[in-house]
Amino acid sequence: MGSVREYFSNIANGLGSTAKGMAITLRHFTSEPIITVQYPKESLPIPPTYRGMHILEQEKCIDCHLCAKACPVDCIEIESVKHGRVLEWKKFSIDYKKCIFCEFCIPPCPVDCIHMTTEFALATDNADGMVEDMLTWTGLRPEDQAKLEGKASPKKPAAPAPAGGGEGDARSRVAAMLAKRKKEEG
Ligand code: SF4
Ligand code: SF4
């Protein structure tokens, strides 16, 4: 008789616990605000210290390779021809297939011209497209050419990169870089 009572008491306990759990679930379901963010349509604010894609202030870069030497995964490639102090740019790329966003490349830069932005949207189905060209221009700018030829610089540089490197600047330059890549991917 005792075991029959225990059997029904266990069932009653189980039903009671289930009802309590369901009541909590229902309370949260109806009274709590929705916290799921519908990415990519919505996104949460990104902390300013987030280590995302890089941006290069090419006009300040002196082609010293210190950033590339500090990179633990060898994902920075730099190539330029030096004409005295004038640089003829061939390549400055970062391979984001390898980059581990460690930020080791930033502190060694003697002229503070490479930065990390909060841009993280790198997803692509084209692995080759993950090698990002950091250059704003290649070769020589007209004013560089003029310097080499000993002429006065043209008044308006043809391909200027915005100076300053603030986060706003950086974000718009990374956005332009991503738009260029999207266009190339067709
Ligand atoms: S963040 Fe790290 S892995 Fe990426 S380029 Fe800089 S040093 Fe290399
Ligand atoms: S460390 Fe700075 S100046 Fe030197 S190559 Fe890298 S980005 Fe340019």
Image: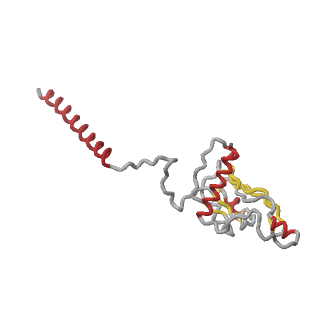
Residue at horizontal 60 percent and vertical 66 percent from the top: 166
Image quadrant in which you'd find residue 119: bottom right
Q: Quadrant of ligand 2?
A: bottom right
Residues 186 and 1: in front is 186
Residue 54 on image: x %, y %: 64, 58
Quarter containing the N terminus:
top left
Residue at the far front: name it.
Answer: 155
Q: Is residue 21 left or right of residue 129?
A: left
Q: Is residue 21 left or right of residue 97?
A: left
Quarter containing the C terminus:
top right
Residues 165 and 13: in front is 165
Residue at the far left: name it.
Answer: 1
Image quadrant in which you'd find residue 106: bottom right
Residues 158 and 184: in front is 158
Residue at the far right: name it.
Answer: 149
Q: How is the image coloured?
A: secondary structure
Please give the count of numbered marks on the rendered protein. Answer: 0
Residue 154 on image: x %, y %: 81, 70
Query: In the figure, 9 relative to 141: above or below?
Result: above
Residue 20 on image: x %, y %: 24, 41
Residue 61 on image: x %, y %: 72, 65
Residue at horizontal 75 percent and vertical 64 percent from the top: 63
Residues 154 and 42: in front is 154
